[in-house]
Amino acid sequence: AALDTHKKIASAALDSHKFETAKSLEANQQALETHKKAAALELDAHKKEATAALESHKSETAKSFEANQQALEAHKKAAAADLDAHKKEAAAALESHRSETAKNFEASQQALEVHKKAAAAELDAHKKEATAALESHKSETAKSFEANQQALEAHKK
């Protein structure tokens, strides 16, 4: 009889333990499901935030890239315009230098021609003077010779 009582008490305790374990397992299952749902919602929210942040970053990067491209194009155009202006200035300066050099050369050529003419006229004048002096000397010498000849003839007589 004590054994039967003990078996009944043990059986009741086992049944109670099974019931409590089943309740605890059921509570744990519900808590796990609740946690899974909360984690899934949180993960979904993080995915949406990350996607939105990535899209925003892509958009900002695209805007920045476009702005940089426009700035680069503007810089290229400005540099090309500067280069063109420098080329025009250099060409104008070269043309001006050529023109001045041509004028200077022409002026030098004219001055040289004037100098040549003046030198030729001076040389011609010197030749005429020398020729006249030589003719005068020849005439004087001839007169002197004639006078000497006459004096010699007179002396001989």
Image (cartoon, rainbow, N blue to C red):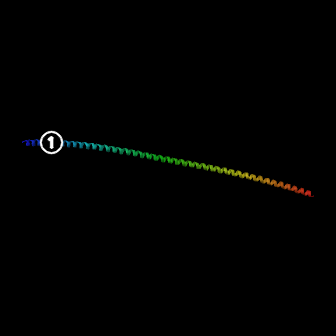
Image side of residue 69 versus residue 55, left or right: right
Residue sitting at the far right:
157
Q: Nearer the viewer, residue 32 or 107?
A: 32
- The residue type indicated by label 1 comes to His
Q: Position of residue 112 (x, y in %)?
A: 67, 51
Dot 1 lies on which element? helix
> Which residue sits at x=77%, y=53%?
130
**42 on left or right of 116:** left
Looking at the rendered image, the quarter that the C terminus falls into is bottom right
Local packing at callout 1 (Cα closer than 10 Å; few below 14, some 14-19, many 20+) is few
Residue nearer the viewer, 152 or 60: 60
Is 157 above or below relative to 29?
A: below
Q: Does residue 120 sit above or below 12 in this rendering?
A: below
Give residue 10's position: percent from left, percent from top: 11, 42
Front position in the image: 120 or 41: 41
- Report the residue marked by disc 1: 17
Q: Is residue 119 above or below residue 9?
A: below
